[in-house]
Amino acid sequence: MESSILGTRIRQRRREIGTTQAELAQKVGISPSYLNLIEWNKRRIAGPLLGKIATALDISLSELDDVSERRLSITLGEIAHLPALAGVQVEEERINELIGRFPGWARGVASLARSEREATERAYMLSDRLSNDPFLSENIHRILTRIAAVRSISEIIYEYEDIPDDRRREFDRIIYEESRTLSDVAEALAVYLDKAAEDEKVFTPVDEVEALFEHHGNHFSEIETLSEILAPEFAGMNLRQERMRARELVTTRLGETIDRIVGDQAKISTHAGQNRARDLLTEYAVAAATLPMTAFREAAANARYDIETLSAEFACDTDIVCQRLTALPESDDTPTFGYFRANAAGTIIRMLRLERLPVPRYAVACPLWVLFRAQQSSDVLFRQRAIFPSGARFVFVAKAVSQGKVGFGAPRHFVTDMLAMSEEDSFKTVYAPDDDTRLEEVGPSCRLCPRDTCQHRVTDPLTDN
């Protein structure tokens, strides 16, 4: 635990139980002056002395040295960097004192900020949706067209009283037909929006498949078990050259299981969504058979989740390693990863989301992400320490690789794989930043980003700051 929290907590607890500095110092065998330095965060404390102080204060060591407070400290640090607080002069250096002295207020501030962030992200998502969803765009255009037609004809009838009866009847017929069409379009739009709300934001085949992976936490136990059995047949197989054969083997042996998983997901209602789900679950099974979870989990921890080391150890491509890292079972010691793959056009073609990482569903992502920068230098691993407008911090690791045939005269096509993790989780990996690592301001996308001074902005934000 950070000493700046710990010292304050010791002082606060001592006062709560009515013990003086001299009494506590005598109980633990140190001088009052040294205890005073500890309480005012001038000296670090750990080990046996920390245990003695916890006993003397009649509090458990876990209560005194609480991991949740470290996370709370990181969260409040993110809040301090929110654009909305830029002119408030928040005392970031006193965050840990706030947690130590007023833990309830500290948690309350974090909770309020979390609620505000969730509401803002939902508003951004809806704005993004309204601007880019083809169904909405088409039907809103149809509604506006019909309204304009009805209004124009109504103005003619109102302004010209001497219209012949046959022409007036024709105008009445047009108003009737346009009004009926307008009603049908509006009803279809209402049904569509109701279904979207019921389906929890599932709108397209891509969204349907994303919902499948989110529902399972990107971990399919049945496929994992069967892939462990299939793993010996993958031994010695070079996936860089035999990926299609590996897919055929998985389809033959695990095809029924994959079909059942897809069939059990009620939200996958489109044929395109079902095909995409089968394709990605086949890729999942290939990765699981190539890197069985039991062996991979241990190797990943030993390598501190270094994707290049793991790729070399298991003789497989970067994307296979990234996919397996996102499938690691949750535990306190295991970081949680997100995975993104983008093509040369900047389109994100594969996405395994990470909690709190805002990614646009229908628009182009922020060009400042290292996901796009990495294509400037292929086969080189880039690390980026990023901070979003919400104050959330992440570490991105990206590498561009060539796909397709190679040789003189053959065009080279690149895709970029990017692993994403929270800055907190990055300290469990080889990619942990230090104090000298540059912190780069990024956003979700130009349309969803409130940074109005960004030199790389290409469109105005959908909402005012």
Image: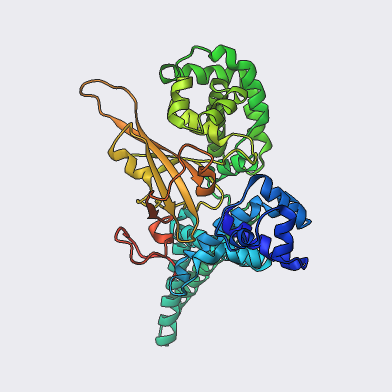
In the image, 164 versus 316, the foreground residue is 316
Query: Residue placed farthest to the left in the image?
Result: 409
Residue 344: name its quadrant: top left
Q: Is residue 421 visible?
A: yes
Viewer-proximal residue, 213 or 260? 213
Instruction: Name the residue located 28 percent from the left edge and 29 percent from the top edge.
Output: 412
Q: Is residue 143 left or right of residue 446?
A: right
Residue 383 drawn at (x, y percent): 39, 42
Q: Is residue 184 visible?
A: no
What colour scheme governs how the chains and residues are painted in the rendered image of this protein?
Answer: rainbow
| Residue that appears at 70% across and 64% down | 22
Q: Where the C terminus falls, by quadrant? A: bottom left
Residue at x 62% of width, y 59% of height: 7
Measuring from the top left, give residue 64's x and y in whole percent: 69, 54
Residue 418 placement (x, y as % from top left) = 43, 39
Residue 388 higher or lower than 284, as above or below: below
Above or below, 362 against 257 in this view is: below
| Left or right: where 106 falls relative to 341 | right
Compared with residue 360, is residue 142 higher up or lower down, i.e. above or below? Answer: below
Asked if residue 263 is positioned above or below residue 114 in the image, the reply reads above
